[in-house]
Image (cartoon, rainbow, N blue to C red):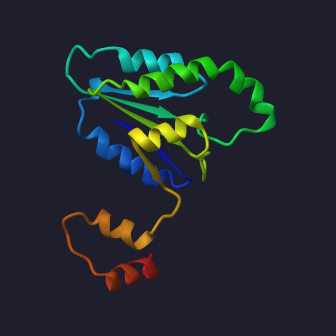
């Protein structure tokens, strides 16, 4: 499965990533910084883990989902072949690999082919608004707390 997490609320993205990481052994989790290196992502996604069946690949700081600036046109042209390889991989994805792209921009370009493909075959989640009351309620976990007490906590802290 492929996921695209984007938005300015890094805390919420990190919490979502923690939920995914809890399902995998540390040896089957791969963190990659994007840096226009799609080959490394594809190689990692195609390699089989020796220790378990499932693998989690987290790609940080992806820029391929951002709106293009005129100065980036040249980089985009150079990276087009690699992007086609990624698109081909996503069309024939390994079921044992969970691939998460993280983009820390407030918006993504929904007109790009890669974004449309992830929307069609995967899940795109936006993390732009932090609802502080809901976040505090989640932090209490199995303990019950009312919104009145949360308001009191916020006012006191």
- Depth order, front residue of 141/72: 72
Vertically, is 129 above or below 89? below
Vertically, is 76 above or below 134? above
Quadrant (top left/top right/bottom left/bottom right) for the C terminus = bottom left
Q: Is residue 141 left or right of residue 111?
A: left
Vertically, is 9 above or below 147? above
Q: Is residue 111 left or right of residue 57?
A: right
Expressed as whole percent of the image width and height from the top left, the position of residue 62 reads: 56, 35
Q: Is residue 115 left or right of residue 93?
A: right
- Depth order, front residue of 56/152: 56
Residue depicted at 26% across the width and 77% down the height = 145
Residue depicted at 36% across the width and 26% down the height = 93
Quadrant (top left/top right/bottom left/bottom right) for the N terminus = top left
When asked about the image quadrant of residue 121, the answer is top left
Expressed as whole percent of the image width and height from the top left, the position of residue 84 reads: 55, 22
Asked if residue 37 can be seen in this view, the reply is no
- Depth order, front residue of 134/45: 45
Expressed as whole percent of the image width and height from the top left, the position of residue 81 reads: 60, 17
Asked if residue 44 can be seen in this view, the reply is yes
- Depth order, front residue of 83/144: 83
> Farthest residue in the right direction?
71
Q: Exactly how many numbered labels are in the figure?
A: 0
When asked about the image quadrant of residue 152, the answer is bottom left
Residue depicted at 27% across the width and 66% down the height = 140
Residue depicted at 59% across the width and 47% down the height = 108
Expressed as whole percent of the image width and height from the top left, the position of residue 87 reads: 49, 26
């Amino acid at each position: 499965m492929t996921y695209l997490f984007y938005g300015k609320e890094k805390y919420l993205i990190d919490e979502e990533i923690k939920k995914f990481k809890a399902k995998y052994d540390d040896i089957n989790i791969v963190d990659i910084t994007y840096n226009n290196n799609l080959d490394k992502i594809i190689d990692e996604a195609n390699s089989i883990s020796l220790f378990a069946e499932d693998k989690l690949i987290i790609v940080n700081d992806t820029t391929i989902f951002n709106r293009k600036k005129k100065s980036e046109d040249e980089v985009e042209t150079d990276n087009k072949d690699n992007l086609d390889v990624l698109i081909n991989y996503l069309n024939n994805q390994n079921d044992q690999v969970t691939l998460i792209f993280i983009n820390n921009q407030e918006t993504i370009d929904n007109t790009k082919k890669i974004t449309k493909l992830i929307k069609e075959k995967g899940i795109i989640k936006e993390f732009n608004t932090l609802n502080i009351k809901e976040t505090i309620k989640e932090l209490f976990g199995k303990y019950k707390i009312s919104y009145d007490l949360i308001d009191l906590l916020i006012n006191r802290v």
